Image (cartoon, helix red, strand yellow):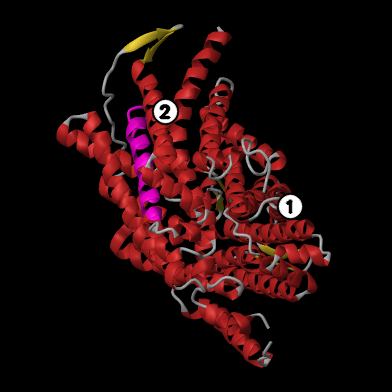
């Protein structure tokens, strides 16, 4: 019986881990390239879910909603980057935390004002189940994990082989040199922020059917994504994915014994231990 | 370093102090409470200025110290009969200090944003513990209690009214300000500022940077805990909302709005923020954070020195 539960929680942990990886890879991409700690990332996740809700109500199609939400929030991300983060370029990275924290307050309260405190629901695009031990496990959850993996994989391929992906990596390595080679660095930053925002929005829509969509949903996620990004090593895409799954599995197992609210503490403890013994992240070889 | 005469500073200080002393006598009840609240939040903001402004470590976890101060005071007021104000302060400070030791030990190993994130996570740990440990902390509902009397055993005893409470808070905040100011000007404070300016060099000169940082976090946590005790006494409750990291965020906002590294600035920032909140909630009701957030973000971009940044030199002499 316990073994069954552990296996079910393993599946659950991997599914939430993949969503978390999608959120965190946007966060770590933005950090790695722009030195910006995006406090408003959870709000982009939440607004993505809301755009999804609106599109589904209007069109009835989940997949259209996924695309529309990604594009709309990516555009919003570009606007945010141009208006608030571009003037901060070259200043202390801490100022970007402050600016994005201000933004997160604005966006969160805007959502509360616009959509009210009642949680909205995104219907699952398909409702099939299969039997996992004694549970009817929805296929949709597995589909989320697969889709998240696909999006992250596409991002990786883009960064590795796409022309613009190479621009992005060049900007990460040496901003000044990249500018000297003719890469429009400010626009690379805008594009990266837009990509990160779009990924957050996509994960918001994908995760919407599992929980209600409300204005405060971003808060939990941004905290978890911070933990993941620190545990995985800031700016390290592979590390964030591994850390997302690791943290989500830990929480899933912990919630076998304690309430989910308390299971969060396990990931906090994981963070503290990481900081004590491997301050640059679990998956980074040695500090510079 | 140009030296201005300290006379100007002390004249200004006395003037503001006198204004704050007479404030409750002339203000209506609502604004009287408002000024007292500003002083309490101002003390919290000042305590975090030691880290943000003087040591260069942006703490996003001050709600933990503040909240534990509140719950410490609540423990004293609920468990000891008759409730004693001084015991509440002692309990609150001990609770805040306990948390501060813990947070300081771990978080000072990290720098910059990592420090910020770690302090943020720590405050969330304490939030989750307080929120879920319902039997002891009252969980979501928090704890409410009666206000203790202002008494010195054997000398006098009188119940607080809103005037005496204001003066008591004012006295605590003023003394705290003077102590903090003295600390920032002491050799210890100079080392903190040198860590802010150039950490590797400070270490190279021979200072044990880590120990200085730990002491700085603890000091800051103690004063934040004191603010928590005052808030608990003022409002007669302790609630988990005050441990939530949004409070820490507000403290950072106070600092940035008022001007970091000035001690007075954060207090002014708290006043400015609370006034903005009061003004905007007339039009925006509970959505006042939309305009306030916009103003804050604009200030980060266009006015990084804050309202009192131009006075920074003078206030530190």
In this view, B57 is above or below A56 = below
Q: Is residue B146 visible?
A: no
Residue neighbourhood size for the residue with mark 2, other residues' Cα within 10 Å, grouped as few (<14), some (14–19), many (≥20): some
**Mark 2–mark 1 distance (CA, rounded to whole Å):** 48 Å
In this view, A58 is above or below B153 = above
Query: Predominant secondary structure in magenta?
Result: helix
Q: Residue at label 1?
A: B94
Q: Are marks 2 and 1 on the same chain?
A: no
| Numbered range of the magenta stretch | A188-215
Magenta stretch holds residue A196: yes
Which is more toward the observer, A205 or B141? A205
Q: Residue at label 2?
A: A149
| Percent x, y of residue A226 | 53, 43
In this view, A48 is above or below A12 = below
| Percent x, y of residue A278 | 69, 40
Q: Which secondary structure lies at badge 2?
A: helix
């Amino acid at each position: 019986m316990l073994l069954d539960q552990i296996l079910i929680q393993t599946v659950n942990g991997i599914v939430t881990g993949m969503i978390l990886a999608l959120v965190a890879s946007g966060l770590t991409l933005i950090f790695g390239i722009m030195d910006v700690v995006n406090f408003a990332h959870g709000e982009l996740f939440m607004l993505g879910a809301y755009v999804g809700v609106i599109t589904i109500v209007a069109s009835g199609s989940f997949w259209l909603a996924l695309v529309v939400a990604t594009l709309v929030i990516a555009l919003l991300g570009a606007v945010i980057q141009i208006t608030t983060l571009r003037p901060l370029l070259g200043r202390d990275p801490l100022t970007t935390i402050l600016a994005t924290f201000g933004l997160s307050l604005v966006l969160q309260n805007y959502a509360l004002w616009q959509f009210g405190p009642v949680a909205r629901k995104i219907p699952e695009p398909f409702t099939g189940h299969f039997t996992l031990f004694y549970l009817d496990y929805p296929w949709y959850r597995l589909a989320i994990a697969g889709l998240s993996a696909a999006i992250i994989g596409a991002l990786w391929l883009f960064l590795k082989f796409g022309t613009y992906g190479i621009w992005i990596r060049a900007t990460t390595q040496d901003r000044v040199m990249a500018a000297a080679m003719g890469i429009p660095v400010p626009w690379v930053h805008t594009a990266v922020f837009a990509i990160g925002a779009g990924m957050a929005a996509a994960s918001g829509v994908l995760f919407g059917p599992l929980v209600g969509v409300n204005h405060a949903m971003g808060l939990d996620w941004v905290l978890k994504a911070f933990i993941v990004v620190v545990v995985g090593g800031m700016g390290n895409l592979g590390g964030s994915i591994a850390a997302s799954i690791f943290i989500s599995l830990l929480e899933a197992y912990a919630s076998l014994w304690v309430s989910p609210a308390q299971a969060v503490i396990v990931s906090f403890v994981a963070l503290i231990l990481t900081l004590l013994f491997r301050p640059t992240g679990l998956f980074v070889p040695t500090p510079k | 370093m140009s030296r201005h005469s300290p006379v100007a500073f002390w004249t200004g200080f006395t003037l503001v102090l006198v204004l704050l002393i007479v404030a409750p006598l002339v203000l209506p009840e609502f604004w009287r409470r408002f000024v007292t609240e500003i002083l309490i939040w101002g003390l919290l903001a000042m305590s975090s200025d030691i880290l943000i402004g003087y040591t260069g470590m942006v703490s996003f976890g001050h709600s933990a110290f503040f909240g534990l101060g509140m719950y410490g005071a609540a423990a004293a007021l609920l468990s000891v009969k008759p409730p004693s104000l001084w015991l509440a302060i002692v309990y609150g400070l001990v609770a805040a200090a306990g948390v501060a030791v813990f947070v300081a030990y771990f978080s000072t190993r990290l720098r910059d944003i990592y420090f910020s994130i770690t302090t943020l996570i720590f405050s969330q740990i304490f939030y989750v513990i307080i929120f879920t440990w319902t039997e002891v902390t009252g969980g979501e509902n928090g704890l409410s209690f009666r206000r203790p009397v202002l008494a010195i055993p054997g000398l006098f005893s009188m119940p607080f009214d809103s005037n005496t409470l204001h003066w008591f808070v004012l006295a605590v905040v003023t003394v705290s300000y003077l102590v903090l100011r003295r600390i920032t000007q002491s050799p210890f404070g100079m080392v903190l500022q040198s860590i802010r300016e150039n950490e590797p060099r400070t270490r190279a000169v021979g200072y044990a940077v880590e120990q200085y940082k730990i002491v700085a976090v603890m000091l800051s946590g103690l004063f934040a805990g004191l603010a928590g005790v005052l808030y608990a006494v003022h409002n007669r409750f302790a609630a988990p909302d005050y441990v939530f990291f949004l409070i820490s965020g507000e403290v950072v906002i106070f600092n940035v709005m008022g001007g970091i590294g000035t001690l007075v600035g954060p207090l002014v920032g708290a006043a400015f923020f609370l006034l903005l909140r009061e003004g905007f909630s007339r039009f925006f009701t509970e959505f006042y954070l939309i305009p306030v957030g916009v103003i804050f973000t604009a200030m980060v971009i266009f006015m990084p020195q804050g309202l009192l940044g131009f006075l920074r030199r003078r206030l530190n002499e």
